[in-house]
Image: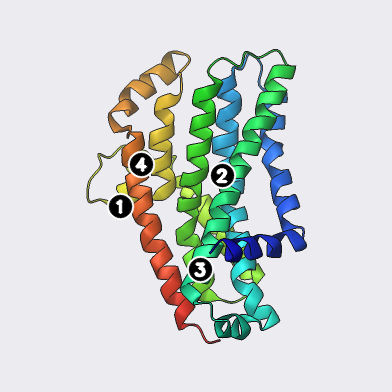
Amino acid sequence: MLKLITCEFWKLKRKGLLKIAFFTSVLFPVFNSMLLSGADLADVMSSVREESGFLLLIPILVILAANLFFKEHDNDTLKNLICVPVTKSRLVMAKVTVLLLFSVVYELMGFCIGALFAAAQGISLSGWGLQLLLTFCTGILIWAAALPCIILVVWCNKSYIISVIIAFFYTMLQYALHLSDAIMMKPLGLNISTFIPVPIIFRWLYQFKTPEGKIMTEFYNRFSLYFISTPVVFLILAAEAAVCIALVIRVYQNQEV
């Protein structure tokens, strides 16, 4: 399995996609560090996790997934791999593992860049340990949140343009849903709000913010009833990730070689 993961990684590296993708991890931390006045480290890192993570990382993961899953079909090498033999299920596991590693490293790179700019501006790095842990966990959760979209890309099995369109609409829809009180302010249970990935991650992240001002304090006091703990958010997203990976394997196996 390790050799398969290494091979999948080198596929992306040869095309230069990793360099371009990793470059985007510095955009929001740099801009927010320059624009935020009187910010603390938590404010800087929230841009790494929220804007950079949810608006950039999710579509990037989907586009990278499209490249990984379409590569064998484009080069007509899937028959050779199966003859080695390498099962399609192992190929899928190698590809999603590469995406997981990329997601975590992407978030950690954003953290490092944000911390450097914060230090350069004289912002205190107090509480960096918590911010690092939150950023690391967010990288894992965003990977899980991207998997439903990856199912669509693998199932459509069309082109990179279609994949980009799917990734764009999925990202915008998920991000918009976290702004809806009807989605966010519902107790956990057998309801759709519990199983929409991005809003549920925000319900976990928001509890680590320090509200400023009367309006924000009132909002957080009202919203605190719907915060979810770290074990719960990981349990929900891990279950969804397992289902998504199983579906990707099923779809990938049923496709013609």
Q: Position of residue 126 (x, y in %)?
A: 56, 14
Rendered image quadrant of residue 157: bottom right
Give whichever of discs 4 and 3 has the lower sequence position.
3
Is residue 175 among what the camera can see? no
Give whichever of discs 1 and 4 has the lower sequence position.
1
| Residue corresponding to mark 2 | 104
Q: Position of residue 29 (x, y in %)?
A: 67, 32
**Circle 4 — which element?**
helix
Q: Is residue 75 above or below residue 5?
A: below
Q: Nearer the viewer, mark 4 or mark 3?
A: 3
Residue at figure coordinates x 43%, y 64% from the top left: 245
* Count of numbered marks: 4
- In the rendered structure, which amino acid carries the disc numbered 1? Ile
The tag on residue 192 is 1
Give whichever of discs 1 and 2 has the lower sequence position.
2
Q: Is residue 226 above or below residue 102?
A: above
